[in-house]
Each structure stands twice: as structure tokens, then as C-alpha cells.
Image (cartoon, rainbow, N blue to C red):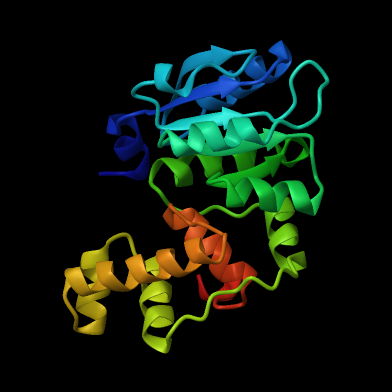
């Protein structure tokens, strides 16, 4: 089967847009229609809805500013804590805002200047619980100088790196000659250490961001 045929038979990624500008909705909807694999717009909101009302949504594309107000970071927390994969798509570019959104559980942070190619790729990555790092997000991670870095054992770092490079914990287990349960144990310990440091990482994308911030891995290793 060709790549085009595979894309045609793939289940569409279901997304919702939360942004107070109609032109943004129209642009993203057009990009979604042309995307491969297919992306289906199933929700369009100019104000943040109750996250519990967004069912069967794979990815939420979320602005941070509504009606010209200040960036509302709590809306990121509400969607992420409800289990949604959040791609922040906003005008904000400052490092503090980027890092705060990642800390609150966003899968990816993009500025609107980064455009179509980055947004479509970020949506596909978030839907598969993979990481996508655009230019603004990469710059913010590189500039992060916070000291709250948990100490991971060499084995924990090894498990992390293998997990970042593969699609399943079973593949990690096979590569390292351990059981999937042991992989889960190592990952749970890493998450516990980050949570104890006040930097929770509840998703794979968040763990990758943490590891990059702390110099445990580099972009070239992913």
C-alpha cells in the first residue's frame, strides 16, 4: 500500500479549535482538510468550553488570549488535567510562557508565526502521544536555566532515551532485555521525581521536554 493509500484509509485525527478570531478558525480548518494523515475539525470555539464537554477529541488547538486579555494559562491546565492533548497556538513568544504551558501539561507550544507545516505536524504528533518541538519551543527549552532538576539513575536515563526513540514500551523492554513491567517501573520513578521537584510530566511529550531542558538528551539523540 502506498503512503497516499494508507493516509486515505487512516482514521482522521479529531481536533477542536479554541480561539477568538474567526480568521484563525478558517485557516486551520483549510489546513486540516488538506492534511495527510487526515485531520477532522469537530469543534470550533471562540471562548474556552468546559473540557468535560469535549468528548472524542484527539487534540485541542488552544490560543492563550481571549478578547485581547492577558494569556490565560489556567485554561491550559484545565484541558490537560482533563486528559486532552493540547497544542498551544498563540501569539506569545516569551520563554516563561512557553515553559509554563509545558509545565501545565501542553503537548506542544507553537506561535502563530510558525504556520501550517509546524501546526499540522504538531497535531499528528500529539494525537499519537509523540513529541513535536517547533522553533519557539526549542529556543525556550534551550534557554531554561531553572535549577529544579531531579537526579535520575543511569538506568532511568537509558530507559527514557529508548522510550523516546520508539513507539512502545514493549520495544524498549526487548532492546534492554527487561520486562515491560520493569520499563513501567522506571518511567513511574522518573515521573515521581519530576513531580516531587514541582515539574510534573504526565505525558510522553512532557517527559521529552523535561529531558531536553535538563540536558539528559539532545535533539540529535531523538
Q: In the picture provided, is 166 more to the left or to the right than 40?
A: left
User: Residue at position x 16%, y 75% from top?
Assistant: 179
Is the residue 159 above or below the residue 163 in the image? below
User: Residue at position x 50%, y 22% from top?
Assistant: 16
Is the residue 94 above or below the residue 165 in the image? above
**Displayed quadrant of residue 57:** top left
**Displayed quadrant of residue 93:** top right
Q: Residue furthest front?
A: 196
Percent x, y for residue 216?
Answer: 55, 78
Percent x, y for residue 219?
Answer: 59, 70
Q: Quadrant of the N terminus?
A: top left
Instruction: Report the label total.
Output: 0
User: Residue at position x 57%, y 30% from top?
Assistant: 61
Is the residue 95 above or below the residue 213 in the image? above
Q: Residue furthest bottom?
A: 154
Q: Name the one closer to the observer, 180 or 35.
A: 180
User: Residue at position x 79%, y 39% from top?
Assistant: 92
Q: Name the one closer to the observer, 112 or 189.
A: 189
Q: In the picture provided, is 140 more to the left or to the right than 48?
A: right
**Displayed quadrant of residue 137:** bottom right
Percent x, y for residue 170?
Answer: 21, 66
Amino acid at each position: 500500500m502506498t503512503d497516499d493509500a494508507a493516509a486515505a484509509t487512516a482514521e482522521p485525527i479529531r481536533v477542536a479549535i479554541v480561539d477568538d478570531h474567526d480568521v484563525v478558525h478558517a485557516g486551520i480548518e483549510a489546513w486540516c482538510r488538506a492534511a495527510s494523515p487526515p485531520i477532522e475539525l469537530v469543534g470550533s470555539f471562540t471562548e474556552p468550553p468546559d473540557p468535560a464537554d469535549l468528548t472524542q477529541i484527539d487534540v485541542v488547538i488552544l490560543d492563550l488570549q481571549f478578547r485581547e486579555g492577558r494569556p490565560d494559562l489556567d485554561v491550559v491546565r484545565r484541558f490537560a488535567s482533563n486528559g486532552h492533548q493540547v497544542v498551544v497556538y498563540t501569539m506569545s513568544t516569551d520563554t516563561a510562557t512557553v515553559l509554563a504551558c509545558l509545565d501545565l501539561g501542553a503537548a506542544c507550544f507553537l506561535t502563530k508565526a510558525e504556520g501550517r507545516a509546524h501546526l499540522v505536524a504538531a497535531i499528528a504528533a500529539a494525537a499519537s502521544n509523540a513529541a513535536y518541538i517547533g522553533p519557539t519551543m526549542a529556543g525556550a527549552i534551550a534557554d531554561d536555566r531553572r535549577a529544579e532538576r531531579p537526579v535520575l539513575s543511569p538506568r532511568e536515563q537509558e530507559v527514557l532515551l529508548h522510550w523516546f526513540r520508539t513507539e512502545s514500551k514493549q520495544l524498549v523492554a526487548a532492546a534492554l532485555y527487561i520486562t515491560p513491567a520493569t520499563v513501567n517501573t522506571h518511567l513511574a520513578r522518573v515521573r515521581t521525581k519530576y513531580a516531587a521537584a514541582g515539574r510534573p510530566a504526565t505525558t510522553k511529550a512532557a517527559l521529552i521536554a523535561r529531558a531536553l531542558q535538563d540536558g539528559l538528551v539532545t535533539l540529535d539523540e531523538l
